[in-house]
Image (cartoon, grey):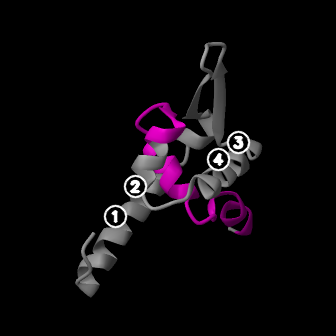
Amino acid sequence: MEVAIAVVGGSWKMTVVKHLLGGPLRFNALNRAVGPVTPRVLTRQLRDLEADGVVHREVFPEVPPRVEYSLTPLGESLAGLVAQLDTWGGAYANRLGLVR
């Protein structure tokens, strides 16, 4: 469990994985999808996920450069965990009367 938390336990990492499950996204699209995260923090989370083999960063040789982020097969293997956490979070928010 400690290894898993070390890899995906960052403040926005699971949210990033959740949004990348729908397919590759460019940085700004991912930033909008993730929510109230600063570009600096999102960049750090993406670099960590890339270093851990969860996210793939592809730079296209275009002008201006285009960069897309996608999940690796290892990242895609987190789909079940993301779904379970999303379900649990929804039930928890409903129990407390929080808006989700």
Determine the residue positioned at 52% across, 50% down. Answer: 16
Q: Amino acid at mark 2?
A: Ala
Secondary structure that dominates the magenta span: helix
User: Is 100 positioned to the left or the right of 20 in the image?
Assistant: left
The residue at which mark 3 appears reads as 50
Magenta segment? 2-29
Compared with residue 10, is residue 31 higher up or lower down, i.e. above or below? above
The residue at which mark 2 appears reads as 83
User: Is 76 positioned to the left or the right of 21 in the image?
Assistant: right
Q: Secondary structure at mark 1?
A: helix
The residue at which mark 1 appears reads as 87
> In the rendered structure, does residue 26 fall within the stretch colored magenta?
yes
The residue at which mark 4 appears reads as 46
Q: Amino acid at mark 3?
A: Glu
Determine the residue positioned at 69% across, 57% down. Answer: 7
Question: Which quarter of the figure has residue 68?
Answer: top right
User: Is 52 positioned to the left or the right of 92 in the image?
Assistant: right
| Mark closest to the chain's N terminus, 3 or 1 | 3
Compared with residue 64, is residue 54 higher up or lower down, i.e. above or below? below
Q: Nearer the viewer, residue 66 or 56?
A: 66
* Image disc number at residue 52: none
> In the rendered structure, does residue 15 fall within the stretch colored magenta?
yes
Percent x, y of residue 9: 63, 65
Q: Nearer the viewer, residue 46 or 77?
A: 46
